[in-house]
Each structure stands twice: as structure tokens, then as C-alpha cells.
Image: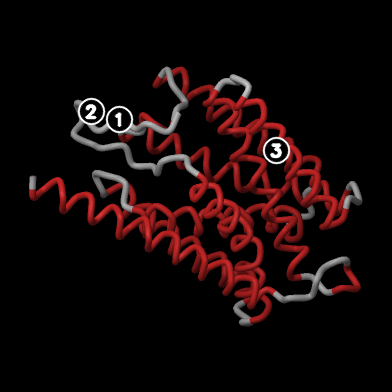
């Protein structure tokens, strides 16, 4: 599951990272930053929802353009794109729920159907959903469409569980964390690697959202009251450190290959 192909007839190298522990740590922290970062910019900084959406959408478009232009996995570009997808995915759900008054039951169902359609078309066209063979442009486009949809779905599902169904932030984080643990156990016992990966990927979004709300919200609302600014700063610092290590290791590996 962790071994990546090195090349293809297209000349592209696999453009996603190895699925190791660091992958999941950065992914979960990215989802939390998506939850807290959007709130911080819109409320604490005072940009407002409209300006924040426009700025984040423009930054995501620029990051995605860089990601599509690269011919191999570049840690800082890839994870910058993931963080921005997380923010934009959160904003899409918030726009539907808070701005347009769409029920969380409806938005969760709609995003689930949209994701199922993406996976169906992706598989019909490419005959694989594995991220370890991301070596064609069409697969990469399907991949990022699915990623954006997982973040929007995860945000809606997380809000549905913690707010509409009344689980609260603590029990929401515990519930989704338990589901991730069950998915991991299923993979360890021989479950389909591609299926369990995507299930875990979807579940990390509501887990990260619940964790973000738990850390940032005031104690009167069931949170720890740390605040969006400090939570975002802490998690972004950890993300930057882990990505920097990955980038340095990648650069060193390429230098070694060139010198041989």
C-alpha cells in the first residue's frame, strides 16, 4: 500500500505522498486548520465571509495550478493545496448552511452523492481509485475533485453530528476517532486498501472539525476556549515543520540520485 510507482508513459511521477503516519497527522491538522482558519479570517481578522471566500478560492486556484504544473510530488505545493482545499471545503458547507439555509441533512446527503458520482466516473474512466498510481492528468483531476468533495462532505457530516444530532464537540471527536480506529483495524485485518483509505480520508475531516471546535469554542459552548488564532497558529506550525522535513528529505534524495 505504501509503495509508489516511479514513472509512467506520460512522463509524470506519482504526485501524492506516501501514506505513512506523517501523512495522517498533517491531514488531520489540515482539516482542523480548515475549520479554525476560515473562522479566524472571517471573524477575528474581520474580512467577512464574502471576502474570505474570494481570497481563499483565488489562493486555492493558484496552488492547484502549481500542483498540476509539477511533474512529481513536491511536499510544500501538495500540502499547501490540501490546506487551502480544507478551508474552501469548509466555506462551501458554511455558505450552504449559514448563508442559504440548507439543512445539514440535505447538504450531507448531497455531498455524499456527489462524491459517489465522482468515484463512479473516476473508476469507469481509469479503472482504479488508488492514489498510488496518480500518474496521468485525468487521474489527478479526479483526485482533487474527490478531495474537495470529501472536505465539504466531512464538514457537513461533522456539523450534523455535533450540532444537529447533539453529540457536542467532545463526543463528536470521540465518535469519529473511533470510526477511524475501526477503519484502520479493518485494513490491518486484510480489508481493501483503497476502500479503507478513502473511508479514513473522509472521516478525518469531521474528526478534525470536531477537534477544532473543541479547542477553539468557549467553555460555555462545550469547548476549551483556546481560540481560533492560537489553534490555527499551533497546528500550522506543526504542519510547516513536518512538510519542511519531507521537502528537505525529498531534495536530498533527488540530489543523491543526480550524483549517482
* Residue in view at x 82 percent, y 57 percent: 169
From the viewer's side, name the closer residue of 5 and 147.
Answer: 5
Kindly give the residue lying farthest to the left in the view shown: 260
Direction from residue 33 to residue 251 in the image, left or right: left
Q: Tell me the mark number nearer the camera, choosing from 2 and 1.
A: 1
Q: Tell me the mark number nearer the camera, choosing from 3 and 2.
A: 3
Q: Which residue is mark 3?
A: 181
Q: Which residue is mark 2?
A: 8
**Between discs 3 and 2, the one toward the N terminus:** 2
Asked if the residues shown at circle 3 and circle 2 are in contact, with their CB atoms under 8 angstroms apart, the answer is no
Direction from residue 200 to residue 253 in the image, left or right: left
Using a 10 Å C-alpha cutoff, classify the residue at mark 3 as few (fewer than 14 neighbours), some (14 to 19) or many (20 or more).
Answer: few
Say which element carries label 1: loop
Q: Quadrant of the C terminus?
A: top left
Asked if the residues shown at circle 2 and circle 1 are in contact, with their CB atoms under 8 angstroms apart, the answer is yes
Q: Which residue is mark 1?
A: 5
* Residue in view at x 58 percent, y 42 percent: 149
From the viewer's side, name the closer residue of 194 and 51.
Answer: 194
Amino acid at each position: 500500500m505504501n509503495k509508489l510507482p516511479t514513472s509512467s508513459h506520460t512522463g509524470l511521477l506519482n504526485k501524492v505522498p506516501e501514506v505513512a503516519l506523517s501523512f495522517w497527522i498533517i491531514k488531520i491538522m489540515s482539516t482542523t486548520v480548515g475549520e479554525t482558519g476560515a473562522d479566524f479570517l472571517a471573524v477575528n481578522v474581520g474580512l467577512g465571509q464574502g471576502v474570505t471566500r474570494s481570497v481563499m478560492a483565488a489562493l486555492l486556484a493558484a496552488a492547484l495550478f502549481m500542483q498540476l504544473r509539477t511533474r512529481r510530488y513536491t511536499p510544500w505545493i501538495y500540502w499547501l493545496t490540501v490546506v487551502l482545499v480544507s478551508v474552501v471545503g469548509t466555506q462551501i458547507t458554511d455558505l450552504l448552511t449559514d448563508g442559504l439555509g440548507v439543512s445539514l441533512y440535505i447538504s450531507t446527503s448531497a455531498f455524499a452523492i456527489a462524491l459517489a458520482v465522482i468515484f463512479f466516473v473516476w473508476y469507469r474512466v481509469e479503472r482504479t481509485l488508488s492514489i498510488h498510481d496518480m500518474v496521468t492528468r485525468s487521474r489527478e483531476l479526479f483526485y482533487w475533485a474527490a478531495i474537495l468533495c470529501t472536505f465539504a462532505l466531512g464538514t457537513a457530516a461533522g456539523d450534523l453530528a455535533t450540532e444537529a444530532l447533539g453529540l457536542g464537540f467532545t463526543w463528536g471527536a470521540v465518535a469519529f476517532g473511533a470510526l477511524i480506529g475501526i477503519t484502520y483495524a479493518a485494513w490491518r485485518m486484510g480489508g481493501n486498501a483503497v476502500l479503507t483509505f478513502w473511508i479514513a480520508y473522509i472521516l478525518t475531516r469531521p474528526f478534525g472539525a470536531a477537534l477544532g471546535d473543541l479547542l477553539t469554542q468557549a467553555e460555555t459552548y462545550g469547548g476549551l476556549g483556546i481560540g481560533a488564532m492560537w489553534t490555527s497558529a499551533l497546528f500550522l506550525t506543526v504542519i510547516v515543520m513536518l512538510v519542511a522535513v519531507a521537502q528537505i528529505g525529498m531534495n536530498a534524495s533527488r540530489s543523491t540520485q543526480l550524483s549517482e
